[in-house]
Image: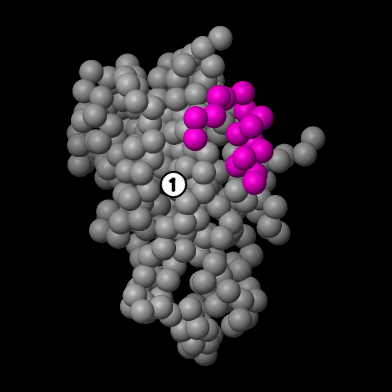
Amino acid sequence: MTDLSRPTLPGALPDKRQVAASFSRAAGSYDSVAALQRAVGLGLLQQLPAGLQPSRWLDLGSGTGHFSRILAERFTQASGVAVDIAEGMLRHARNEQGGAHYHVAGDAERLPLRDASVDLVFTSLAVQWCDQFASVLAEAQRVLRPGGVLAFSSLCVGTLDELRASWQAVDGLVHVNRFRRFEDYQRLCAGSGFEHLELQRCPHVLHYPDVRSLTHELKALGAHNLNPGRPSGLTGRARMQGLLQAYEAFRQPAGLPATYQVVYGVLRKPQA
C-alpha cells in the first residue's frame, strides 16, 4: 500500500528521536527567536470558526507553551492538554506555567488521548516533522468529538529555498530540511473524512543582515538541518565562504530573504 503522506522529494523526513532531542536542547533559547512561529500561530488562531467554544482543547506540538497559555486565556471555561514529543520543551513549559493544564509527552501520529475526548486540536508548525501526515489526520479524527475542529499550520516545499539554492551552488549536499508538497496536504486532507473550512498556502518572508543570523536562529529554534543524508562534522571555511557569496545573490534592500511557505488548514469532524 502506497503511503501518500510521504514527501515526494528524494529522501525521508528526520527521525523523530532526533527531532525530539533537538527541540529539547533548544527549549531555553526557543522563545527568544520564535517571531515567525508566533506570527503563524496567531494567524491560525484568527482562522478558528466564529463562536467556537470547546469544553476541552489540545495544543499539539505545544513547545514552550506559548499558545497553550493563549488558548487557556481565550477559552476560560475549557480544560486543556498540551502535548509535545520533546521532553525538554514540556519541562520548560511546566516551569513557566505550572499546573494550568496537563502537559503530556506524546506523538502526533499516536496521541495519548481517548477517543472523542476533545473539541479542538490546535497545532502550529509541528506536523511538518511527522513522516505520515495521514496518521496525524486519522488521530485527530479519532480524538475529536463530532463537530470538533482541527486547526493546523505547517511548512511545505518552497520553504528556505534561498538557503537551499545557495548550498546547492556550493556542494549539492542536503543542508536544509525537506518538506511535504502543498499538493500532498490538499490530497490528504481531501481524503481524510474531515469537512474543509480552510486550506491555503501563504508565504512569510523574513529578512536577515547576514547568513549567520539566519543559521543561528535556526539552531536556536532547534530547526536546523535534521534530514537523513545531511553532511556530518563541521562546515569548512571554504564552503561557508561559498555559501555567503551564493546567498548574496538574493539580497534585497531589507536584507537577505528567507521564505517560509506556510500551510494553514482548518477542518471540522462531521456531526454524523
In the displayed structure, does residue 150 sit left or right of residue 56? right
Amino acid on which disc 1 is placed: Leu
What residue appears at the point 62 percent right and 40 percent down from the top-left corner?
A: 186
Relative image position of residue 58 (x, y in whole percent) = 38, 28
Against 182, residue 2 (above or below) is above
Residue 114 to residue 243: above or below: above
Residue 246: image location, x then y, percent: 52, 84
Q: Residue furthest top?
A: 272
Q: For numbered disc 1, what is the local secondary structure?
A: loop
Q: Residue 28, position in %: x, y?
A: 27, 55
The magenta segment is: 183-198
Q: Is residue 192 left or right of residue 16?
A: right
Residue 36 visible from this viewpoint: yes
Please state the horizontal and vertical placement of residue 266, each as a whole percent of the image.
Answer: 47, 33
Quadrant position of residue 223 = bottom left
Task: Look at mark 1 in the image and give the residue it sits on.
Answer: 125
Using the image as rendered, state which of residue 150 and residue 243 is in the foreground. 150
Q: Residue at x 34, y 37 (%)?
A: 45
Residue at (50%, 55%) from the top-left corner?
Answer: 261
- Please say whether residue 194 is one of the residues in the magenta stretch: yes
Q: Quadrant of the C terminus?
A: top right
Picture layout, residue 190 above or below residue 96: above
Q: Quadrant where the N terminus lies?
A: top right
Residue drawn 24% across the image and 29% down it: 74
Residue 52: in magenta span = no
**In the image shown, does 225 or 134 lie closer to the viewer?**
134
